[in-house]
Amino acid sequence: MYSLSATQRPEILDKHCTKRQTNAPTVFCSLSCQKHVIMEKNHHPPVANLMRQQQVVIAPTRYSLTHTRAIRQSLRGGARVATMPGMTNEMFSRGGMSADFSLIKQKISDLGSYFRRRRIVKVTSEQGTDVSFEVNWREWKLDDNGICNRPKMLTNLPAGKAFIMPREGTMNGTVVIDGSWESNLVDDPITFVIENGMVMDVKGGTIAATIRQEFGEAAKRLRTKDRENVWTMAEFGFGMNPQARLSGNVLEDEKRLGTCYFSVGDNTALGGTSSVGIHIPGVLKNASVWLDDTLFISKGEFALWNDQ
Protein backbone atom coordinates (compact mmCIF):
# COMPACT_ATOMS: atom_id res chain seq x y z
CA MET A 1 0.00 0.00 0.00
CA TYR A 2 1.31 3.45 -0.90
CA SER A 3 2.15 5.90 1.85
CA LEU A 4 0.42 9.25 1.31
CA SER A 5 1.51 12.56 2.73
CA ALA A 6 -0.93 14.52 4.88
CA THR A 7 -1.60 16.93 2.03
CA GLN A 8 -2.19 14.15 -0.50
CA ARG A 9 -4.73 12.14 1.47
CA PRO A 10 -7.85 14.30 1.08
CA GLU A 11 -7.35 14.65 -2.67
CA ILE A 12 -7.04 10.89 -3.07
CA LEU A 13 -10.34 10.33 -1.23
CA ASP A 14 -12.13 13.02 -3.24
CA LYS A 15 -11.48 11.20 -6.52
CA HIS A 16 -13.91 8.41 -5.83
CA CYS A 17 -17.56 8.31 -4.78
CA THR A 18 -19.88 5.36 -5.21
CA LYS A 19 -23.27 6.74 -6.27
CA ARG A 20 -26.50 5.70 -4.64
CA GLN A 21 -28.11 2.71 -6.35
CA THR A 22 -31.81 1.92 -6.33
CA ASN A 23 -32.85 0.95 -2.78
CA ALA A 24 -29.19 0.87 -1.71
CA PRO A 25 -27.57 3.27 0.75
CA THR A 26 -24.28 4.99 -0.06
CA VAL A 27 -21.44 3.28 1.79
CA PHE A 28 -18.25 4.51 0.16
CA CYS A 29 -18.42 8.25 0.03
CA SER A 30 -16.03 11.12 -0.64
CA LEU A 31 -15.61 13.90 1.84
CA SER A 32 -17.74 16.19 -0.33
CA CYS A 33 -20.51 13.62 -0.91
CA GLN A 34 -21.69 12.69 2.56
CA LYS A 35 -24.91 10.71 2.26
CA HIS A 36 -26.94 9.29 5.11
CA VAL A 37 -25.91 5.67 5.63
CA ILE A 38 -28.51 3.20 6.85
CA MET A 39 -27.60 -0.46 7.27
CA GLU A 40 -30.80 -2.13 8.35
CA LYS A 41 -30.54 -5.28 10.41
CA ASN A 42 -31.83 -7.68 7.75
CA HIS A 43 -31.01 -5.68 4.63
CA HIS A 44 -28.24 -6.68 2.21
CA PRO A 45 -27.73 -3.86 -0.30
CA PRO A 46 -25.55 -4.42 -3.39
CA VAL A 47 -22.74 -2.36 -1.89
CA ALA A 48 -22.49 -4.81 1.04
CA ASN A 49 -21.96 -7.61 -1.47
CA LEU A 50 -19.23 -5.57 -3.15
CA MET A 51 -17.52 -5.03 0.20
CA ARG A 52 -17.35 -8.77 0.81
CA GLN A 53 -15.41 -9.17 -2.44
CA GLN A 54 -12.66 -6.69 -1.54
CA GLN A 55 -9.33 -7.14 0.19
CA VAL A 56 -9.27 -3.55 1.47
CA VAL A 57 -12.29 -1.41 2.43
CA ILE A 58 -11.88 2.31 3.21
CA ALA A 59 -15.08 3.94 4.42
CA PRO A 60 -15.02 7.74 4.89
CA THR A 61 -18.77 7.93 5.45
CA ARG A 62 -20.94 10.38 7.34
CA TYR A 63 -22.22 7.76 9.79
CA SER A 64 -20.27 4.89 11.29
CA LEU A 65 -20.34 1.48 9.61
CA THR A 66 -18.26 -0.18 12.32
CA HIS A 67 -21.18 -1.97 13.98
CA THR A 68 -23.00 -3.01 10.79
CA ARG A 69 -23.53 -6.46 9.35
CA ALA A 70 -21.81 -5.38 6.11
CA ILE A 71 -18.54 -4.75 7.95
CA ARG A 72 -18.75 -8.01 9.89
CA GLN A 73 -19.30 -9.93 6.66
CA SER A 74 -16.37 -8.16 4.98
CA LEU A 75 -14.09 -9.10 7.85
CA ARG A 76 -15.21 -12.73 7.76
CA GLY A 77 -14.38 -12.71 4.05
CA GLY A 78 -10.80 -11.66 4.80
CA ALA A 79 -10.95 -7.92 4.10
CA ARG A 80 -9.11 -5.36 6.17
CA VAL A 81 -11.27 -2.37 6.91
CA ALA A 82 -10.67 1.27 7.91
CA THR A 83 -13.79 3.20 8.87
CA MET A 84 -13.74 6.99 9.07
CA PRO A 85 -17.23 8.25 10.00
CA GLY A 86 -17.53 12.03 9.86
CA MET A 87 -14.05 12.48 8.40
CA THR A 88 -13.27 15.96 7.06
CA ASN A 89 -10.39 17.34 5.01
CA GLU A 90 -9.09 19.18 8.07
CA MET A 91 -9.23 16.08 10.28
CA PHE A 92 -7.50 14.02 7.61
CA SER A 93 -4.39 16.20 7.55
CA ARG A 94 -4.05 17.31 11.19
CA GLY A 95 -4.68 16.24 14.76
CA GLY A 96 -5.12 12.55 15.44
CA MET A 97 -4.26 11.51 11.86
CA SER A 98 -0.78 13.05 12.26
CA ALA A 99 0.13 10.78 15.18
CA ASP A 100 2.89 8.16 15.17
CA PHE A 101 0.69 5.06 15.01
CA SER A 102 3.61 2.70 15.52
CA LEU A 103 4.26 4.38 18.88
CA ILE A 104 0.56 4.32 19.74
CA LYS A 105 0.47 0.60 18.96
CA GLN A 106 3.33 -0.01 21.38
CA LYS A 107 1.74 2.08 24.14
CA ILE A 108 -1.60 0.32 23.80
CA SER A 109 0.08 -3.10 23.75
CA ASP A 110 1.89 -2.20 26.98
CA LEU A 111 -1.47 -1.78 28.71
CA GLY A 112 -2.10 -5.53 28.60
CA SER A 113 -0.07 -6.32 31.69
CA TYR A 114 -1.87 -3.61 33.69
CA PHE A 115 -5.29 -4.97 32.73
CA ARG A 116 -4.42 -8.49 33.83
CA ARG A 117 -6.79 -9.83 36.51
CA ARG A 118 -8.33 -6.40 37.17
CA ARG A 119 -12.09 -6.68 36.89
CA ILE A 120 -13.69 -3.59 38.52
CA VAL A 121 -13.72 -0.27 36.66
CA LYS A 122 -14.68 2.90 38.51
CA VAL A 123 -15.11 6.29 36.83
CA THR A 124 -15.64 9.60 38.64
CA SER A 125 -15.59 13.28 37.73
CA GLU A 126 -16.15 16.65 39.38
CA GLN A 127 -19.12 17.09 37.04
CA GLY A 128 -20.96 14.27 38.84
CA THR A 129 -19.90 11.00 37.23
CA ASP A 130 -19.75 8.18 39.75
CA VAL A 131 -20.16 4.76 38.18
CA SER A 132 -18.65 1.31 38.50
CA PHE A 133 -18.93 -1.94 36.58
CA GLU A 134 -17.28 -5.30 36.02
CA VAL A 135 -15.20 -6.36 33.01
CA ASN A 136 -13.58 -9.55 31.84
CA TRP A 137 -9.95 -8.45 31.70
CA ARG A 138 -9.24 -10.85 28.83
CA GLU A 139 -11.71 -8.96 26.61
CA TRP A 140 -9.92 -5.59 26.44
CA LYS A 141 -9.51 -4.56 22.80
CA LEU A 142 -5.97 -3.37 22.15
CA ASP A 143 -5.90 -3.31 18.36
CA ASP A 144 -7.37 0.16 17.67
CA ASN A 145 -3.94 1.52 16.90
CA GLY A 146 -4.05 2.67 13.27
CA ILE A 147 -2.13 -0.34 11.99
CA CYS A 148 -4.31 -2.39 9.63
CA ASN A 149 -2.00 -4.58 7.58
CA ARG A 150 -3.42 -8.08 7.84
CA PRO A 151 -6.63 -9.77 6.66
CA LYS A 152 -9.67 -9.50 8.94
CA MET A 153 -8.33 -6.42 10.73
CA LEU A 154 -10.62 -3.47 11.50
CA THR A 155 -9.63 0.02 12.61
CA ASN A 156 -11.11 3.48 12.95
CA LEU A 157 -9.03 6.38 11.67
CA PRO A 158 -7.82 8.38 13.43
CA ALA A 159 -7.06 5.52 15.81
CA GLY A 160 -5.80 5.20 19.34
CA LYS A 161 -7.94 3.80 22.13
CA ALA A 162 -8.37 0.83 24.46
CA PHE A 163 -11.93 -0.36 24.98
CA ILE A 164 -14.12 -3.14 26.31
CA MET A 165 -17.72 -4.23 26.77
CA PRO A 166 -18.88 -3.79 30.38
CA ARG A 167 -20.13 -7.07 31.75
CA GLU A 168 -23.85 -7.01 31.03
CA GLY A 169 -26.02 -6.11 34.01
CA THR A 170 -23.17 -4.91 36.25
CA MET A 171 -22.99 -1.14 35.68
CA ASN A 172 -24.55 1.10 38.31
CA GLY A 173 -24.27 4.79 38.99
CA THR A 174 -24.24 8.07 37.10
CA VAL A 175 -22.36 9.10 33.95
CA VAL A 176 -22.10 12.79 33.06
CA ILE A 177 -21.07 13.48 29.46
CA ASP A 178 -19.24 16.82 29.38
CA GLY A 179 -17.06 16.51 26.27
CA SER A 180 -19.03 15.49 23.20
CA TRP A 181 -22.04 13.40 22.26
CA GLU A 182 -22.21 11.78 18.83
CA SER A 183 -20.95 14.61 16.58
CA ASN A 184 -21.37 17.67 18.78
CA LEU A 185 -19.49 19.35 21.59
CA VAL A 186 -21.57 19.39 24.77
CA ASP A 187 -22.51 22.81 26.18
CA ASP A 188 -24.85 21.50 28.86
CA PRO A 189 -23.69 18.23 30.45
CA ILE A 190 -25.81 15.13 29.78
CA THR A 191 -26.52 12.89 32.77
CA PHE A 192 -27.28 9.18 32.39
CA VAL A 193 -28.69 7.37 35.42
CA ILE A 194 -27.77 3.69 35.15
CA GLU A 195 -29.08 0.62 36.95
CA ASN A 196 -27.92 -2.92 36.26
CA GLY A 197 -26.29 -1.96 32.97
CA MET A 198 -29.28 -0.05 31.55
CA VAL A 199 -29.95 3.67 31.22
CA MET A 200 -32.97 4.47 33.39
CA ASP A 201 -33.06 8.24 32.86
CA VAL A 202 -31.41 10.94 30.73
CA LYS A 203 -31.15 14.51 31.97
CA GLY A 204 -29.75 17.60 30.32
CA GLY A 205 -32.31 19.87 28.72
CA THR A 206 -32.95 19.89 24.98
CA ILE A 207 -30.21 17.43 24.06
CA ALA A 208 -31.53 14.91 26.61
CA ALA A 209 -34.96 15.14 24.99
CA THR A 210 -33.36 14.57 21.59
CA ILE A 211 -31.53 11.50 22.89
CA ARG A 212 -34.72 10.05 24.36
CA GLN A 213 -36.50 10.60 21.05
CA GLU A 214 -33.69 9.08 18.96
CA PHE A 215 -33.41 5.95 21.07
CA GLY A 216 -37.18 5.71 21.33
CA GLU A 217 -37.46 5.68 17.55
CA ALA A 218 -34.80 2.97 17.36
CA ALA A 219 -36.75 0.92 19.91
CA LYS A 220 -39.91 1.07 17.81
CA ARG A 221 -38.13 -0.87 15.05
CA LEU A 222 -37.54 -3.79 17.42
CA ARG A 223 -39.73 -6.52 18.80
CA THR A 224 -41.50 -5.44 21.98
CA LYS A 225 -39.44 -7.68 24.23
CA ASP A 226 -36.17 -6.25 22.86
CA ARG A 227 -37.00 -2.56 22.96
CA GLU A 228 -35.49 -1.75 26.33
CA ASN A 229 -32.14 -3.08 25.08
CA VAL A 230 -31.53 0.13 23.13
CA TRP A 231 -30.55 1.59 26.53
CA THR A 232 -27.75 -0.92 27.14
CA MET A 233 -24.44 0.54 28.31
CA ALA A 234 -22.56 -1.11 25.50
CA GLU A 235 -18.94 0.02 25.58
CA PHE A 236 -16.31 1.79 27.66
CA GLY A 237 -12.91 3.00 26.56
CA PHE A 238 -10.24 5.65 26.87
CA GLY A 239 -8.09 7.54 24.40
CA MET A 240 -4.40 6.90 23.72
CA ASN A 241 -3.66 9.30 20.86
CA PRO A 242 -1.62 12.33 22.05
CA GLN A 243 -2.31 14.27 18.83
CA ALA A 244 -6.09 13.83 18.86
CA ARG A 245 -8.22 16.86 19.72
CA LEU A 246 -11.62 17.42 21.31
CA SER A 247 -13.44 19.02 18.40
CA GLY A 248 -17.00 17.71 18.43
CA ASN A 249 -16.34 14.75 16.18
CA VAL A 250 -16.48 11.65 18.34
CA LEU A 251 -14.28 9.75 15.86
CA GLU A 252 -11.37 11.85 17.09
CA ASP A 253 -12.69 12.96 20.48
CA GLU A 254 -12.74 9.46 21.98
CA LYS A 255 -9.11 8.91 20.90
CA ARG A 256 -7.67 11.96 22.70
CA LEU A 257 -5.19 10.94 25.38
CA GLY A 258 -6.82 11.49 28.77
CA THR A 259 -10.46 11.26 27.71
CA CYS A 260 -12.75 8.32 28.33
CA TYR A 261 -16.10 7.46 26.79
CA PHE A 262 -19.23 5.37 27.16
CA SER A 263 -21.43 4.10 24.33
CA VAL A 264 -25.12 3.30 24.55
CA GLY A 265 -26.94 0.74 22.40
CA ASP A 266 -25.72 -2.20 20.34
CA ASN A 267 -22.92 -4.30 21.88
CA THR A 268 -22.93 -7.30 19.55
CA ALA A 269 -19.63 -6.27 17.92
CA LEU A 270 -18.04 -6.83 21.33
CA GLY A 271 -19.77 -10.13 21.99
CA GLY A 272 -22.88 -8.86 23.74
CA THR A 273 -26.56 -9.70 23.34
CA SER A 274 -28.00 -6.24 22.62
CA SER A 275 -28.67 -6.26 18.86
CA VAL A 276 -30.54 -2.97 18.47
CA GLY A 277 -29.12 -1.17 15.43
CA ILE A 278 -28.03 1.98 17.26
CA HIS A 279 -24.70 2.69 18.97
CA ILE A 280 -23.80 6.22 20.08
CA PRO A 281 -20.79 7.27 22.20
CA GLY A 282 -20.33 10.18 24.56
CA VAL A 283 -16.97 11.54 25.74
CA LEU A 284 -15.93 12.64 29.23
CA LYS A 285 -13.05 15.11 29.12
CA ASN A 286 -11.97 15.43 32.77
CA ALA A 287 -12.81 12.12 34.40
CA SER A 288 -10.74 9.84 36.62
CA VAL A 289 -10.58 6.11 35.89
CA TRP A 290 -9.55 3.27 38.20
CA LEU A 291 -9.14 -0.43 37.47
CA ASP A 292 -9.42 -2.05 40.87
CA ASP A 293 -6.99 0.08 42.90
CA THR A 294 -4.86 1.33 39.99
CA LEU A 295 -5.42 4.90 38.78
CA PHE A 296 -5.22 5.07 34.97
CA ILE A 297 -6.56 8.57 34.33
CA SER A 298 -6.60 11.45 36.82
CA LYS A 299 -8.96 14.33 36.03
CA GLY A 300 -8.40 14.06 32.30
CA GLU A 301 -4.67 13.39 32.46
CA PHE A 302 -3.26 9.95 31.65
CA ALA A 303 -1.60 8.92 34.93
CA LEU A 304 -0.47 5.33 34.48
CA TRP A 305 3.01 6.16 33.17
CA ASN A 306 5.10 8.98 34.49
CA ASP A 307 6.39 9.84 31.00
CA GLN A 308 2.89 10.60 29.65
Image: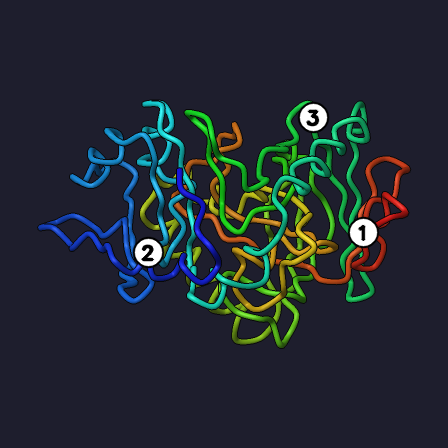
Amino acid beneath label 2 = Leu
C-alpha span from label 3 to label 1: 22 Å
Q: Residue at x 16, y 39 (%)?
A: 46
The N terminus, quarter of image: top left
Quickly name the residue at label 3.
136
**SS of the residue under disc 2:** helix
* Extreme residue in the left direction: 22
Of badges 2 and 3, nearer the viewer stands 2
Of label 3 and label 1, which has the lower sequence position? 3
Image quadrant assignment for residue 185: bottom right
| Crowd around label 3: few <14 · some 14–19 · many ≥20 (10 Å) | some
Image quadrant assignment for residue 63: bottom left
Of label 1 and label 2, which has the lower sequence position? 2
Quickly name the residue at label 1.
302
Quickly name the residue at label 2.
13
Q: For residue 125, say whether it is visible.
A: yes
Amino acid beneath label 3 = Asn
Left or right of 132: which side holds 96?
Answer: left
Left or right of 18: which side holds 292?
Answer: right
**Decide: marks 1, 2 in contact (CB < 8 A)?**
no
Q: Nearer the viewer, residue 287 or 108?
A: 108
C-alpha span from label 1 to label 2: 34 Å
**SS of the residue under disc 1:** strand
Q: For residue 268, say whether it is visible.
A: no
Amino acid beneath label 1 = Phe
